[in-house]
Amino acid sequence: MGQKPNVLTPEVSPLDRFGYTVRDLRERRGLSLRGLAAATFCSYSKLWKWENAKRAPKYRSEVEQLDRVLNAQGLLIELWERIGTDDSPQGHVSVSGLHVSESSVDLAMAASQRATSDDEGIFVPARLRDGSVVFVALDRRAMLRGGMGLGAAAALGGGTPAAASSLPGLTRPAQSASAYSGTPVEYFQRARRLLIDSDNLLGPSRAIAAARQHIEDIKQLRQDAKGTDRHALMELQTQYAEFASWLYQDLGDFDSAQFWLDRAFQWSHTVGDGDLTSYVMARKAQLAGEMRDLVDVVDLAEAAQRMARPRSRLAAVARTYESYGHALRGESTDSERAIDDVRNALDRVSSDTTPWGVWLNEQYVEVHRAQGLEVLGKHAEAAEVFTSAIKALPDGYHRDRGVYMARAAVAHAGAGAPDQAAAVGLQALTIANDTGSGRIVRELARLDKALVPWQRQPEVAEFRAHFDGTLAHES
């Protein structure tokens, strides 16, 4: 047989390419069609029709669920959007005979197989030839050309414990308690606070290796610890796992974020701290919302509320994430009711003594209200709320300010204000370059796409050129 060509043949329709890609991703992951049906809550016959280009998915939520289960990192959503409203298989070519470029699938696959690896790469955003933006592992860089911005230089130095030890006050601890200034527990508590501060100023890539190394050091110390020291170390190990999950979430590596949240949830039961377990469950709801997981987001948030103490701050935190989940599902009334409940609870929960969720304040709630409004299509109102909340942010919230600016820019674009959207987007892009935050990049990728109708306007063209220049590109 001849060598398989590496370009898409001209007669292949978007519907064909979507079906081929679904089948290819499923087979690479060793899933049968019935296994995929069970995982996605779709019927076998519906999935068969999608794979064989007999019919396109009707609802975006179906594609998002399929993309999540197959860890396609947005690739299936991009392919589905290009099918358009006409899903009839006119000019259909048998999928079994297609010769399709596998590079897009390979890029998506690279993002999903490293959650537990000891030799994992760092995610960087890359633009595919079809114009979509995905996150790929740095060890796939041989496939890429161009732009290595968005904190990639920091990421290159942040993948090893040696690089992490260059952070102020963070060196790998010896395995003897006598090596510490104070107790080992006090050392790791201080180190965690420093990492949290570093994360908001410098982004996640520099802190990940240190956080994971500290988890291993704590586990070794627990072998000889007894009594309250052993329990305190286990609690710290759980806190570090949750923090590692947050770092991966901000970097854009959702698989690793889920892995470390699952570990934190398991370990929290060993600690026996109800507040800590409730907080980790709430974080699982937050992550589901960021992944736009329409199946789990509300259920996880409601579970966190059941676990939390009644009328507590953590119950309000979980209710905040529930509000966004309802918005993702198009449930406007439920979303607004939930966020109003949180706003009304702020004074009551301010005296709660739990150390978890202390950042729940009016600005945080307003940002999440704006996020829900934007998803619900209320773009102008969302942009206004985002702008007010950003102005009220305290100093030091550098990365978070960038995330909110990027989301505000998307809202401005949705409201038909492309010049303002591009200007705010450029500011967010500066912070993305400072921190390497994948959350900012994901929002800016949405903005880049939303601004296409105005791409000839100078301000819009400037933003899109700067954004494209920071991305790696598929060769």
Image: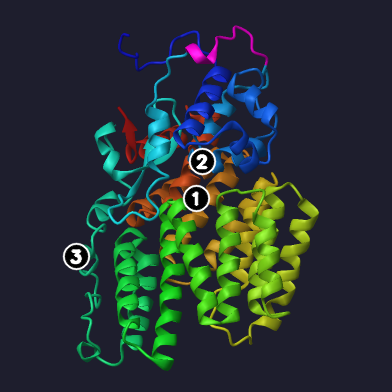
Query: Residue 472 lies in what quarter of the image?
Result: top left
Asked if 474 appears above or below 402 in the picture, the reply is above
Q: Which residue is mark 2?
A: 447
Q: Position of residue 15 (x, y in %)?
A: 58, 19
Q: Which mark is residue 273?
A: none
Colouring method of the image? rainbow
Residue at x 59%, y 9% (from the top left corner):
92
- Helix, strand or loop at label 1? It is helix
Q: Is residue 359 above or below residue 245?
A: below
Q: Crowdedness of circle 2 by 10 Å Cα count: few (<14), some, many (20+)?
A: many
How dense is the environment of label 3, judged by Cα within 10 Å: few (below 14), some, or many (20 and up)? Answer: some
For the residues labelled 1 and 2, say whether their Cβ atoms are less than 8 Å apart.
yes
In 3D space, how far apart are the residues under numbered discs 1 and 2 (Cα atoms)? 8 Å
Q: Looking at the picture, which amino acid does disc 3 mark?
A: Ala
- Above or below: residue 41 compared with residue 233: above
Residue 138 visible to an observer of this rendering? yes
Tell me the amino acid under the disc marked 2: Leu
Instruction: Name which residue lies at 69% across and 59% down.
Output: 299
Going by the image, does 323 lie left or right of 150? right
Q: Earlier in the sequence, mark 1 or mark 3?
A: 3
* CB-based contact (under 8 Å), mark 1 and mark 3: no
- Give the residue displayed 53% in from the left and 44% down from the top: 420
**Is 41 contained in the magenta span?**
no
Q: On the rendered structure, is 23 left or right of 203?
A: right
Q: Which mark is residue 162?
A: 3
Which range is magenta? Answer: 88-97
Q: Earlier in the sequence, mark 3 or mark 2?
A: 3
Does the magenta-highlighted stretch encompass residue 96?
yes
Residue matched to label 1: 406
